[in-house]
């Protein structure tokens, strides 16, 4: 796949006028990594980050702002900046280490994991961007990581009904009251004790942390990691080593299904904007490649796969027609994009060093 | 007679041909080298990575200048510009330590000492020597770290381990001159020496020019060893450059009797993807590292996820080393020793 590569020169011509912007991290060493924005219409690159260990950027739902982690005297801070480079500010103040910022559906808050140093003491912090106030969510539960906001309650209702049918009660009753007022995040959380840690998924609200998965499935025996909610909140994709190797599972009202079943590792699921497809990374062809799967049928299609280099970090264009990703086919990691079938591949960065973590800007209402 | 003398002279000239580049950095042959050597039995295969796509012949040469051409059983060129050669050690060479030479026609274009070690057979039970934090170039120490390092290696030579792992902070500041001094002492070791970088080595950008890959594996008989770099974890986890190398390296030694990782440091805050790969999905049996400048305590016997046991060796610049017994029954680190 992705056999024909065209180095971008005049991207808009190659794409028949398709435009858009991709945020990414660029730098030679970690210490000089900086968030940049590439304009696909003319190839122009604008450095808008702080340029000091900047991490993967995340767009606000309206495409106006970017959140990213950046190096600070204490560790890592969360920063936000407008797409035009204005309004840059650090929003995390309470803790030294701040990781994985994610925007609320209304774009008014950021959730992230924070700790002073100990990796197993991370808590979920929600920052109100209008007031700058940081609140700790989860009622003191530590070991919470990678929060993602719930986009709706349909799936939770299904899980709640299932729990009530099985056990006559559900721990989720409290969650629904808070959902109407404050929303909630789903986070990966450690379970067990040091020396035998595992992880599970939790719903975290301002006042509670409860397991997401119905009790009979929540064994604590497996290690869940990246979790992503579909745009409408009706499905959750999560990677887990349930089954013996790392796979991507999808929770829906019909239950849980392994949608990438393969003996080699599958990880980093990313929903398409319409919630119909998942892009992910897999080692099923030897090196790491980008694939997509249609969860309804679990049919997998290669997108960017090669025998002698890696392709990773997929991100969908707002119309779901294109997938951008990182490839090190020339030695340095650079940003490429391709149509979803992998037939038409374009290189869009050419930087001596590395370009990583592409995030395609959502469509902006002008 | 004159012809014999000429042959000997030619052999000596070849043996003394520039090892590495004049500044000590690697030349045409990236691996194997004296920090990432090949250890194999006569007739066995080993991999040679050439810096470009040139068509070189590969030889191994003993200390007395005797040169053996190796059969190239396979060749592949990477998109990154390098060439991988699958080479077979001649079945009739005697066990011992060899330099690897790359030759273009009759001219030696690169030579790296102590790069290939030929064994009679891989033992089922053997000793690994583990040292870390040599900090060559560090000032304000009781003795120059290079002198202490030399004494530590002399002690290791007497212990006759199968090989030596040197887990990072080889140098104090990563300077070329410090790596040169490190190599000078390293080559006094009579056993294969495998190195990985530490945070001090990354203060400049020279480590890879001296030793090549940051992530690599090797097999020693039934056992698999995996070296990896542990520089700044958090950004690395987000950007994912090392993730695939670790996954593939872990897979390469998945079926080993024992799988043993070695790196400079381990902290629970390192990239979670790396930890999932090495300690959760396919957990290593053991992880060996340094950085702490002290041994691990009873409370620090495993990584937090369980499964993988850890062993930490105190700093070599203070004279410390550790021997580890590897046997069918298990892996047993002995208490660290101190060389006075």
Image (tube, coloured by chain):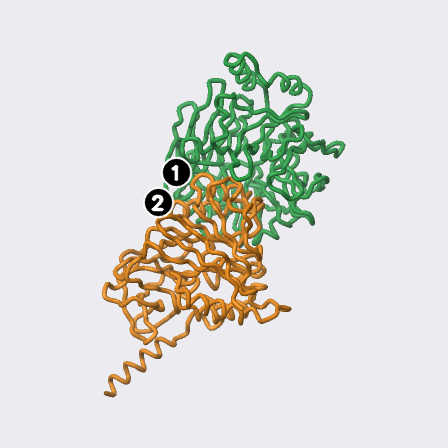
Chain colours: A green, B orange
Q: Position of residue A3 (x, y in %)?
A: 39, 43
The chain that hosts pointer 1 is: A
Q: Residues within 10 Å of mark 2 (few under 14, many from 20)?
A: few
Vertical side of B55 occupied by A37: above or below:
above
Q: Which mark is residue A121?
A: none
**Labels 1, 2: front one:** 2
Disc 1 versus disc 2: distance between alpha carbons?
A: 14 Å
Q: Residue, x 55% and y 51% (percent of image)?
A: B296
Q: How many marks?
A: 2
Q: Could one spot residue B184 in this view of the protein?
A: yes
What residue would you read off at disc 2? B255
Q: Position of residue B32 (x, y in %)?
A: 38, 62
Camera sees residue B206: no
Q: Position of residue B6 (x, y in %)?
A: 28, 84
Front residue of B113 and A50: B113
Instruction: Tell me the quarter of the image containing the C terminus of chain A.
Output: top right
Tell me which chain the residue with mark 2 is part of: B
């Amino acid at each position: 796949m992705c056999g024909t590569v065209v180095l971008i020169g005049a991207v808009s011509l190659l794409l028949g006028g398709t435009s858009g912007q991709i945020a990414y991290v660029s730098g030679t060493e970690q210490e000089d990594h900086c968030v940049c924005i590439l304009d696909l219409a003319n190839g122009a690159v604008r450095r808008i980050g702080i340029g000091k260990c900047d991490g993967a950027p995340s767009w606000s739902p309206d495409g106006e702002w970017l959140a990213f982690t950046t190096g600070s005297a204490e560790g890592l801070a969360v920063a936000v900046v407008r797409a035009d480079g204005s309004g840059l500010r650090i929003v995390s103040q309470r803790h030294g280490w701040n990781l994985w910022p994610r925007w609320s559906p209304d774009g008014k808050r950021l959730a992230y994991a924070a700790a002073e140093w100990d990796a197993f003491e991370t808590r979920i912090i929600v920052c109100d961007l209008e007031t700058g106030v940081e609140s700790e969510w989860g009622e003191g539960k530590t070991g919470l990581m990678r929060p993602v906001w719930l986009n709706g309650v349909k799936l939770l209702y299904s899980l709640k009904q299932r729990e009530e049918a099985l056990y006559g009660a559900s721990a989720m009753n409290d969650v629904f009251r808070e959902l109407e007022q404050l929303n909630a995040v789903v986070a990966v959380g450690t379970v067990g004790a040091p020396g035998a840690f595992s992880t599970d998924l939790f719903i975290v609200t301002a006042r509670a942390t409860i397991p997401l998965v119905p009790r009979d499935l929540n064994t604590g025996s497996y290690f869940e990691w990246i979790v992503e909610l579909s745009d409408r909140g009706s499905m959750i994709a999560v990677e887990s080593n349930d089954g013996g190797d790392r796979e991507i599972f999808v929770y829906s009202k019909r239950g849980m299904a392994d949608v990438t079943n393969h003996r080699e590792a599958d990880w980093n699921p990313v929903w398409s904007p319409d919630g119909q497809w998942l892009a992910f990374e897999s080692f099923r062809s030897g090196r790491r490649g980008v694939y997509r799967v249609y969860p309804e049928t679990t049919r997998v299609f290669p997108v960017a796969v090669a025998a002698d280099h890696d392709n990773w970090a997929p991100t969908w264009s707002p119309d779901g027609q294109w997938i951008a990703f990182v490839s090190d086919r020339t030695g340095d990691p650079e940003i490429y994009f391709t149509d979803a079938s992998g037939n038409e591949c374009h290189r869009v960065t050419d930087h001596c060093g590395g370009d990583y973590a592409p995030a395609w800007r959502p469509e902006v209402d002008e | 007679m004159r012809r014999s003398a000429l042959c000997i002279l030619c052999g000596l000239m070849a043996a003394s041909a520039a090892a590495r580049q004049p500044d000590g950095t690697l030349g045409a042959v990236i691996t194997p080298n004296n920090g990432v050597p090949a250890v194999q039995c006569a007739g066995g295969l080993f991999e040679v990575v050439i810096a470009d796509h040139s068509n070189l012949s590969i030889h191994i040469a003993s200390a007395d200048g005797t040169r053996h051409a190796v059969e190239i059983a396979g060749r592949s060129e990477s998109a990154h510009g390098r060439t991988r050669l699958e080479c077979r050690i001649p079945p009739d060479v005697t066990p011992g330590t060899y330099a690897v030479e790359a030759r273009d026609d009759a001219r030696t274009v690169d030579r790296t000492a102590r790069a290939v070690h030929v064994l009679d057979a891989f033992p089922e039970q053997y000793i690994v020597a583990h040292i870390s934090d040599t900090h060559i170039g560090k000032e304000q120490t009781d003795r120059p770290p290079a002198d202490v390092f030399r004494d530590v290696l002399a002690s290791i030579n007497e212990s006759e381990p199968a090989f030596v792992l040197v887990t990072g902070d080889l140098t104090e500041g990563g300077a070329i001159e410090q790596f040169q001094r490190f190599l000078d002492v390293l080559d006094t070791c009579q056993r294969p020496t495998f190195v990985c970088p530490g945070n001090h080595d990354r203060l400049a950008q020279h480590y890879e020019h001296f030793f090549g890959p940051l992530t690599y594996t090797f097999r020693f008989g039934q056992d698999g060893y995996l070296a990896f770099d542990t520089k700044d974890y958090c950004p690395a986890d987000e950007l994912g450059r090392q993730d695939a190398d670790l996954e593939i390296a872990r897979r390469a030694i998945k079926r080993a009797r024992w799988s043993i990782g070695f790196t400079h440091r381990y902290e629970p805050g390192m990239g979670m993807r790396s930890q999932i790969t090495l300690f959760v999905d396919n957990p290593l049996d053991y992880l060996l590292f340094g950085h702490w400048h002290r041994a691990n305590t009873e409370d620090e016997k495993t990584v937090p996820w369980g499964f993988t046991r850890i062993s930490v060796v105190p700093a070599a610049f203070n004279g410390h080393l550790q021997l580890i017994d590897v046997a069918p029954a298990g892996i047993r680190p002995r208490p660290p020793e101190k060389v006075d």
